[in-house]
Amino acid sequence: MAKILIIGCGVIGTELARVLHRLGYMVTGVKRNPPPSNDTIHYVRANINSATDLETLDTDFDQLFFIVSADGRSEQSYRDVYDIGLTNVLAKFTHLPWIFVSSTSVYGQSQGEWVDENSVAQPDNSNSQLIRQAEQRVIALSPQNTVVRFSGIYGRGRNYLLNSAKQSPVIQYTPPYFTNRIHQDDCVGVLAFLLAKKIAGVALANYYLASDNDPAPQYEVMTWLAQQLSCPAPTIKPMTKNDTLNKRCRNQRLQALGYQFTYPSYKDGYGYEILNAPAHPHD
């Protein structure tokens, strides 16, 4: 069975490793501070910012996943991952096919436009520009490589919107500010699905936009969450001349390939999270 290397074993990378192991793959995970290796994942302790940390890694893998995120919001944090770290990993694994996890933040559209894989990806902030440049380097390495752009990820441990909904937040109502999201279980599902397609010999596109089927106004989402949590509704924010509408993400390419979302809308995903929340959560 194929040997898989996962660079970055956070929540999504670790769960992907478990899923792939259950499917029979041999999985190695790279993590700065890994738990002990087990029968599911063979961990390697390494920091991708250090080329010497990667020297002991085998190179005979069949597929590489790059699922690394910045430690903070500073430009240097993003540069550490998407410039320095990526350079080291590319140098070591030039010969491998890649699936590179990116973000819909590479789209700079802000007037409610629909975006997909054919839309211009020209972000206006330095952090997203670094992600976009990293995408381009991965695709330039080989036309067989694939970039997956996730929208806002939520799920267990990612409780920002749920916590915010409890505070009766001030939310833009007019014009509507659109939000795009994907449950972390679907992040894992998409990555495993794309690998299965590759193993089956399907030629993947260079880019896939991975977001659920329901880009919805933020006020609508927060109002629904407040109702489910029996909290006061959000407060409407007064209009200003600087209000933007964000973008709306279209996932047709991924669906056309055959992927079916476990949580196709925020109501499905957050409904599940609320129903299955621990009795005394520690946020």
Image (cartoon, rainbow, N blue to C red):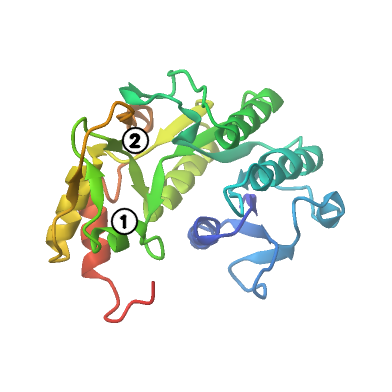
Q: Identify the amino acid type marked 2.
A: Gly
Q: Residue at x 21, y 68 (%)?
A: 275
Measured as percent of width and height from the top left, residue 51 is found at 84, 49
Q: What residue is disc 1 on?
A: 161
Say whether residue 204 is visible: no
Residue 186 coordinates in the image, percent (x, y) = 38, 50
Q: Residue at x 65, y 33 (%)?
A: 134
Q: Is residue 150 above or below residue 107?
A: below
Could you say where residue 77 lies in the image, as x and y percent from the top left? 66, 48
**Numbered label attached to residue 97:** none
In the foreground, 199 or 80:
80
Q: Nearer the viewer, residue 76 or 102?
A: 76
Dot 1 falls on a residue whose secondary structure is helix
Residue closest to the eye, 183 or 248: 248
Judge depth for marks 1 and 2 and give the one in front.
1
Is 93 left or right of 98, judged from the image as shown?
A: right
Up/down of 234 relative to 146, above or below: below
Which class describes the residues within 10 Å of circle 1: few (<14), some (14-19), or many (20+)? Answer: some
Tag count in the figure?
2
Disc 1 versus disc 2: distance between alpha carbons? 29 Å
Please state if 4 lies on the left or on the right of 102 as rendered: right
Residue on which the image places disc 2: 258
Spot occupied by residue 172 in the image (x, y as percentages of width and height): 24, 40
Q: Quarter holding the C terminus? A: bottom left
* Residue sitting at x 50%, y 56%: 12
* Residue at (85% x, 57% y) in the render: 56
Q: Decide which of 161, 11 is in the foreground and name it.
A: 161
Mark 2 neighbour class, 10 Å CA radius: few under 14, some 14 to 19, many 20 or more? few
For this orientation, the residue located farthest to the bottom is 280
Mark 1 vs mark 2: which is more N-terminal? 1
Three-letter residue code for mark 1: Leu
